[in-house]
Image: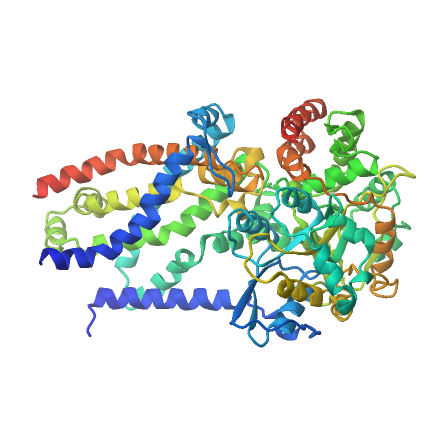
Amino acid sequence: MRFRPHSRALIGAIAVAMTMALVGCGAGSRTGAQTATEVQCDFENPAEPTTINVLAYNSSAVDPFTNTMVKSCTKENVTVKHDPIDFAGQVQKTTATLAGDKGTYDIIETYGFIIGPNAAAQKLQPLDDLYAKYSAEYGLDQIDESMRKGMSYEGKLYGLPMQAQMFVMAYRKDVFDKHGLSAPKTFEELRAAGKKIQDAGDMKYPIALPYLATGDIATHYQATLNSLGSDYVDPKTKEPQLDTPTSKQAFEEMKSLLPYMDPQVTTFDQPKVQQQLFNGTAAIAVMFSGRMNDLTQEQNSKYFDKFAFAAPPAVESGGPLYSRLSIDGWSLPANTDKSPDLLFELIASSVSEEASKASIPAAFPARKGMMTEASSPYAAAAMESIEGTTPPESYPYTPDVSNAVISLIAQTVLGKLSIDEGTAQMQAAAEKVMAKY
Amino acid sequence: MRKREFALLVAPSMIVMLGLLVIPLYRTMVWSFQQVEYGSPGEFIGLENYTAALTDPRFHRAVLFTIGLTLIVTAALVVLGYIIATLINQLGRWRPVVLGIMLVSYVLPNVVGAAAFSWLFDTNFGGVANYLISSLTGAEILWFTDVWPNRIMIILDTVWHLLPFAMLIILAGLQGVPNEILEAAKIDGVSSLKSHLYVIIPTIRGVLFFVTLISIMDVLRTFDQLIPLAPQAVEIGNESIMLYIYNIAFREGSEQLGLGSAISVLTILLILTMLFPFIRDTFRESKVAR
């Protein structure tokens, strides 16, 4: 075959472009399952080759459980398949796979926030019978009762807890020591610490919180509300409480931190806040505990040995901590055609004692007594945080209310809406949502 | 070619088009008159979705932003594409290498390229462009939260991503310009600029129309690059129509597939309106050619 000169030039150009693109794409590939812990996974071998599709986002806290399941349970006629995905992708795919009569996934990673609505819509299988059947074999009675409650709806278990995440405060010990500061216990102390570091010229924006306008900001507003003793909706009356004096105070408190944070903070998710700490451009951050282990890794930052950890501050002295507790677990979609027993044995093995031990220090396992103060540099802080946090309860309306008000929260924090306007609009939006419940 | 052979050869593509184009289009039209949630049959609500879309200020902002972006980017693509294609056309043996390097931005998945592009302006990830601008001007530009800096960044990224395609097509057009015409212009003493304006550009007018047509269609569908480039798109009015559809139909939890479908139908009408002059001219030219 002969090519004309123009064609040869074009083919050459495309070859160069493809090579460069492929080299670039290949640089980030990972195969975590190969190095995962192998645990007991004894299921009744299905008669036909069976592929189990698992949906779970990648993070240093969830990966150990997912990878253990893939490595330990891919045998005989069973292949466990998990493709890398980020959290936003998981949220989309969860909605899609649970929608129809038949879904794409057989096992999905869930968390307390979404258990309520999906359980109420009968999109998840209740796990109580399977839990009782396999409890002894996999030691499931050692899973903390409050964690199981967090993954339950109307008294039924819909998610087998694997690990919990709670807010933890990370701070630069060297910077704090230099200025004679100790870990802030209240927002007032947090502001004072931020001001001292900023005034000294050490860092322009010493405080880092993930205030991403399309996601994390709602979690942090709810944490502020919780620390002031309130929430989106009163669970007894089902009345939204977003235009109350407490809600307005929550916004005042959130806005009071802005002078010490990057002016683009409403575009920062947790990885970006981590990056601020890695780079040494921030000295204090409050994030979910699953992000803390990364800070202690030498390959991530030259400051890896300078970080200290503490429970997050309370908004007001003596109040609950500024924290949220999120429990992650495994759920079985109602629309999977695979054997529930087979699927349950897979998820039970991934949260077994051995698997949970192996997940430390990246995760805070749901099993009792796994995490001790010596388990990781931030274990004591995480345990104190969990003690001082409002216990999570799953309600079917929480995600809808949160989605309805998130943009208004961002606009109020940014000052595009006054606090009075913002809270009034939030209340109206939430009341519209609650009319459905 | 016999009728049977013709049918056999055409059938696979017709089946694919029916499955991927006609059925989804039909479903979108039907849903646009319904209230639809995932996994449940829709409920007919007449024109409510259209009324909701047309009276939503956020939709108006998305339309204005998308049209503005389309006009600016398309103009930049045609002008820069022509200039770069002209320069590359004069290269010798290095042409494949230069073309190959230029094509990287087009071959990369849009969202990957946009994420890397956003790091140029993000101090957290190096922010080379940000650093240079700050060093030269002393200004701290908020690329992700201020309206116009964010728009400029989106325009630059979209041009960077689509320019290789425009340049490649125009380059093919330039290589089709007969040497005789160029030499005749040279002999007549026509300057280089006039040669481009009055000889080359009229000759490749059809190619430039094609590039404009494709660019308009591409930019009107701007979506994935806004995820890394405009995390605050909704709050600062830099939400494209496609991102708006995605946000209300999938992302914001309320799963308003009916409303999303109605906006999709309106978007199809908008695209057809913007392309109408080019489609009409193409028809006229093909008539003349016959």
Give the residue at x 54% y 48%. Answer: B228
Q: What's the residue at 82%, 57% (across, down)?
A: A144
Q: Nearer the viewer, residue A240 or A251?
A: A240
Most extreme residue toward the bottom is: A76
**Residue B94 visible to an observer of this rendering:** no
Number of on-image labels:
0
In this rendering, would A289 be left or right of A321? left
What x and y, as percent, mark residue A294? 72, 61
In the displayed structure image, the side of residue B211 where residue A434 appears, left or right? right
Colour basis: rainbow
In the rendered image, residue A252, in percent from the top left (x then y), is placed at 77, 31
Rendered position, A433 above or below B283? above
Left or right: A371 in relation to B132: right
Q: Position of residue A255 (x, y in %)?
A: 74, 34
User: Height in image: B163 above or below A429?
Assistant: below
Q: Quadrant of the N terminus of chain A?
A: bottom left
Describe residue B186's horizontal placement relative to residue B248 as left or right.
Answer: left
The image quadrant that residue B10 belongs to is bottom left
